Amino acid sequence: MVAGLTRGGASRLLLQNVLAPNFGPLQARLDDMTQTVETGQVDAFKVYTAWGPGGHGFYLDDPAIGLPVVQHAHDLGVKIMCGHKGLTLLNFESTWNQPRDMVAVSRQFPDMQFVVYHSAWTPSHVEGPYNPADPVGIDSLLKALDDYHVPPNSNVWADVASTWRVLLTDPTQAAHAIGKLLKRLGPNRVLWGTDSVWYGPPQTQIMAFRAFEISAEYQDRYGYPALTDAVKAGVLGLNAAELFGLDPAATRCALAADLLERSRPVQRELAAAGDLPAPWVARGPVTRGQVLRWLAHEAGPWIPT
């Protein structure tokens, strides 16, 4: 469907193939990987190490299951391995849901890239300053990076899907979570994610991140970097472009020539005529100036004195 919509331009879709190597014979799963790669339609592999028969997961550095999978992906030329870590789902066992194994494997395959989905964030844990003595949630990822001596801007990446969506309502936790990741992994190794397939359109998450700042106090006290426009641009897409080897400028030019882009004027005309839903617009002020004008002219008894 995407290929049909985008003919005449560049592909708008990157596909990852989900693996379950602990279900059934391992060789059958390796053969599945080979067949998938032969289609030419896979850009990364993804594992859920905490999920398995009888609630028994596996480690990615397990020589009986995990390592053969990583080695086979490497040999097939798929150099991006993603893993769900943290964000415990139904029937997940926390024993296998920690990021240690992904970080360990990254040292054995330095020419591969390893993406820790959700940054190992745990919803029941309150994110604060890095505490290596009690590494829970994002700290478990940072502790593994320290234990295996992984330098910043190496081949371990952190994705913030669902993590940012929940923490954006808690600026203190959000500052610690984003600040710790940027400080330890490096500003080029934090990836945007929305999980909008579960939550709906991601525009509110994008707007919140564009407006978010890490305070000067937290920068001084904890060594967190400032969320500059350049850092945000990296997180929102340029870092992922580096991961997948995409040229943003060339890709944008190619996208401008595809059928979907050429159809946008028609879409706007249909929306203006009421034949299609109108484009999404914010229902309220979205900048400081708009908020102040709203308070001064429309907020009634809430006008500041």
Image (cartoon, rainbow, N blue to C red):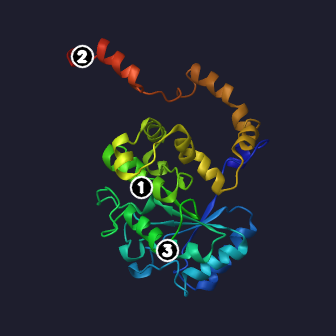
Q: Is residue 17 left or right of residue 5?
A: left
Q: Amino acid at mark 1?
A: Lys
- Local secondary structure at mark 1: helix
- Local secondary structure at mark 3: loop
Q: Residue at x 41, y 71 (%)?
A: 97
Q: CA distance from mark 2 to mark 3?
A: 55 Å
Q: Amino acid at mark 2?
A: Ile
Q: Amino acid at mark 3?
A: Tyr
Q: CA distance from mark 1 to mark 3?
A: 17 Å
Pick the quarter of the image with the C terminus: top left
For disc 1, the marked residue is 180
Q: Residue furthest right?
A: 8
For disc 2, the marked residue is 303
Q: Residue at x 39, y 67 (%)?
A: 140
Image vertical order of residue 29 relative to residue 185, above or below: below
The crowd level at tag 1 (other Cα within 10 Å; few <14, some 14-19, many 20+) is many
Where is residue 226 drawn, in percent x and y? 45, 43
Q: Residue at x 42, y 63 (%)?
A: 120
- Seen from the viewer's position, the closer of residues 268 and 50 is 50
- Seen from the viewer's position, the closer of residues 272 and 218 is 218
CB under 8 Å between discs 1 and 2: no
For disc 3, the marked residue is 148
Residue 84: mark in rendering: none
Residue 31, visible in the rendered structure: yes
Residue 160, visible in the rendered structure: no
- In front of the other: label 2 or label 3? 3
Closer to the N terminus: mark 1 or mark 2?
A: 1
Where is residue 25 drawn, in percent x and y? 58, 86
- Local secondary structure at mark 2: loop
Q: Is residue 64 left or right of residue 74?
A: left
Where is residue 144 drawn, in percent x and y? 44, 71
Closer to the N terminus: mark 2 or mark 3?
A: 3
